[in-house]
Image: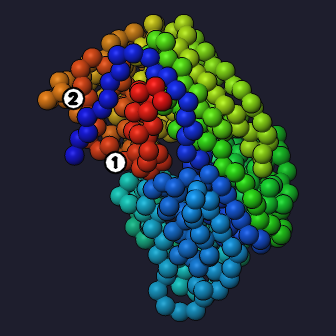
């Protein structure tokens, strides 16, 4: 069922706090599985994706409680509960690639040997996404992972095995693959080195260090861990998610006279590439009360205000720092004078949807000048986007992808005419209150 999107004839004004960082929230739940002491995370994100990680922790027999935005996980004898005969325990990861890939690393050495194992699966979208970049190196470490359908895809059956550390070089920087190998290496014999991480997110390294794990930084973004270390607990406050904030920042960058402040937002260097692009696009960006590292993560209050628009370029080098923001930055490019170029973005074709294809198709339907390329987009502007009428709105295709749905909602703000989304509910994956927050800014709250 489609949903009519709001429009704006004036500036966007206000201050808000976005939900807790999704990447950190996943890890706060899942790392409780290997902790030797209680774990606590305030401002934990309660959304469809992170609930998959929380459900997995509980299904594995760990005690986990959530209430008043606080997650608490207590250590327990969960592997023993999976020993003996019977059927494999099924863990449904839903649409969450982070849940699936991190569980592969966590479970590969943790499950009891000789037991029935664990079957990892997910929804139709997740079962179509590649897992080989995690599974192949885990198998090289000795992991017992059996594909139950298509090679390199879920569902897979994991059984307990003794792992040996390896030296692995990633062809594509991936925080999820790097994290899975570090988690497996922490439970393996010897030393595990992961190279090729580049500018990928380092939330796993920061949280593991908070838990007392010793990691070694290697050249060019590599990292190493030695197995057999004791792992403690943590008590952290999850910062606001910069990927969620980026939608409102971009809206402010598109609408003259706008100014939006997001308080308590994460400022991890691997996550704020979108702010650097906004500055290059002539947008005014101010960071106040920058503080940290708090439990390993920087945070601050970020204000974005309309400036002097100019086109931007994004290349493969900085892609890991803003990969989730590409859809909404593409929307921004339609309002900028000249040609904006996005390259090195092939990874977007492997997300919840083919984001490159759907971004291009939707923006073209709105009247934008967009050229879809194999690994990016070329967008010429400025163009006034055009929708339909209130009684017959232009229905935009989300592909069930939360990032795309929110980006298209921002596109509709400044469009002439009315637009709707074919599946607005998909925003629940990462930001259930997105439309409420957007309405508040439109009202100047």
Q: Quadrant of residue 73?
A: bottom right
Q: Which residue is depicted at the point 32% across and 43% down? A: 424
Residue 225 visible, this angle:
no
Closer-to-camera residue (342/47): 47
Q: Height in image: 173 above or below 59?
A: above
Q: Residue 400 at what x, y percent from top left?
A: 34, 46
Q: How is the image coloured?
A: rainbow
Q: Residue 314 at what x, y percent from top left?
A: 56, 22
- Disc marking residue 62: none
Q: Which residue is mark 2?
A: 394
Left-right relation of 77 to 412:
right
Closer-to-camera residue (400/120): 400
Q: Residue 311 at what x, y percent from top left?
A: 51, 11
Q: Which residue is depicted at the point 55% across and 10% down? A: 307
Q: Height in image: 168 above or below 366?
A: below
Q: Residue 279 at what x, y percent from top left?
A: 61, 17
Residue sitting farthest toward the bottom: 85
Q: Which residue is depicted at the point 83% across and 69% down? A: 230
Q: Quadrant of residue 351?
A: top left
**For marks 2 and 1 on the same chain, the one whose residue lies earlier in the sequence:** 2
Residue 53 visible, this angle:
yes
CA distance separating discs 2 and 1: 18 Å
Left-right relation of 36 to 321:
right
Q: Height in image: 418 above or below 205?
A: above
Closer-to-camera residue (301/31): 301
Q: Which residue is depicted at the point 48% across and 71% down? A: 91
Q: Which residue is mark 1?
A: 425
Q: Height in image: 85 above or below 338?
A: below
The secondary element bearing badge 2 is classed as: strand
The secondary element bearing badge 1 is classed as: helix
């Amino acid at each position: 069922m489609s949903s009519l999107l709001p429009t704006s004839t004036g500036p966007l004004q206000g201050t808000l706090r976005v939900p807790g960082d999704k990447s950190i929230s996943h890890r706060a739940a899942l790392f409780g599985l290997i902790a030797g002491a209680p774990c606590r995370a305030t401002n934990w994100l309660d959304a469809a994706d992170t609930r998959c990680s929380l459900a997995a922790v509980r299904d594995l027999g760990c005690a986990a409680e959530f209430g008043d935005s606080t997650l608490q996980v207590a250590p327990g004898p969960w592997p023993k509960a999976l020993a003996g005969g019977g059927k494999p325990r099924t863990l449904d990861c839903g649409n969450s690639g982070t849940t699936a890939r991190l569980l592969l690393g966590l479970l590969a050495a943790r499950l009891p040997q000789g037991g029935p194992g664990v079957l990892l699966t997910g929804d139709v979208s997740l079962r179509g996404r590649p897992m080989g970049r995690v599974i192949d190196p885990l198998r090289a470490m000795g992991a017992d992972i059996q594909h139950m359908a298509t090679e390199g895809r879920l569902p897979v059956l994991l059984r307990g095995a003794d792992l040996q550390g390896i030296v692995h070089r990633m062809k594509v920087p991936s925080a999820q693959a790097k994290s899975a190998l570090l988690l497996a290496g922490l439970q393996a014999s010897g030393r595990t080195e992961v190279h090729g991480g580049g500018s990928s997110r380092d939330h796993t390294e920061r949280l593991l260090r908070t838990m007392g794990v010793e990691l070694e930084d290697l050249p060019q973004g590599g990292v190493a861990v030695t197995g057999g270390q004791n792992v403690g607990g943590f008590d952290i406050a999850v910062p606001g998610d910069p990927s969620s904030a980026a939608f409102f920042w971009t809206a402010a960058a598109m609408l003259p006279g706008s100014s939006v402040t997001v308080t308590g937002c994460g400022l991890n260097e691997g996550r704020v590439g979108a702010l650097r692009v906004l500055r290059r696009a002539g947008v005014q960006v101010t960071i106040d009360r920058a503080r940290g590292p708090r439990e390993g993560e920087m945070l601050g209050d970020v204000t974005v205000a309309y400036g002097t628009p100019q086109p931007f370029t994004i290349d493969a080098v900085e892609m890991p720092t803003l990969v989730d923001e590409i859809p909404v930055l593409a929307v921004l490019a339609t309002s900028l004078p000249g040609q904006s170029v996005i390259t090195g973005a092939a990874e977007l074709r492997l997300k919840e949807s083919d984001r490159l294809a759907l971004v291009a198709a939707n923006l073209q339907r709105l009247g934008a000048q967009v050229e879809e390329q194999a690994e990016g987009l070329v967008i010429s502007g400025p163009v006034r986007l055009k929708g339909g009428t209130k009684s017959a709105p232009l229905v935009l295709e989300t592909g069930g992808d939360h990032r795309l749905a929110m980006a298209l909602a921002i596109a509709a703000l400044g469009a002439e005419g009315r637009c709707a989304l074919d599946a607005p509910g998909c925003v629940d994956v990462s930001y259930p209150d997105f439309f409420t927050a957007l309405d508040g800014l439109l009202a100047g709250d």
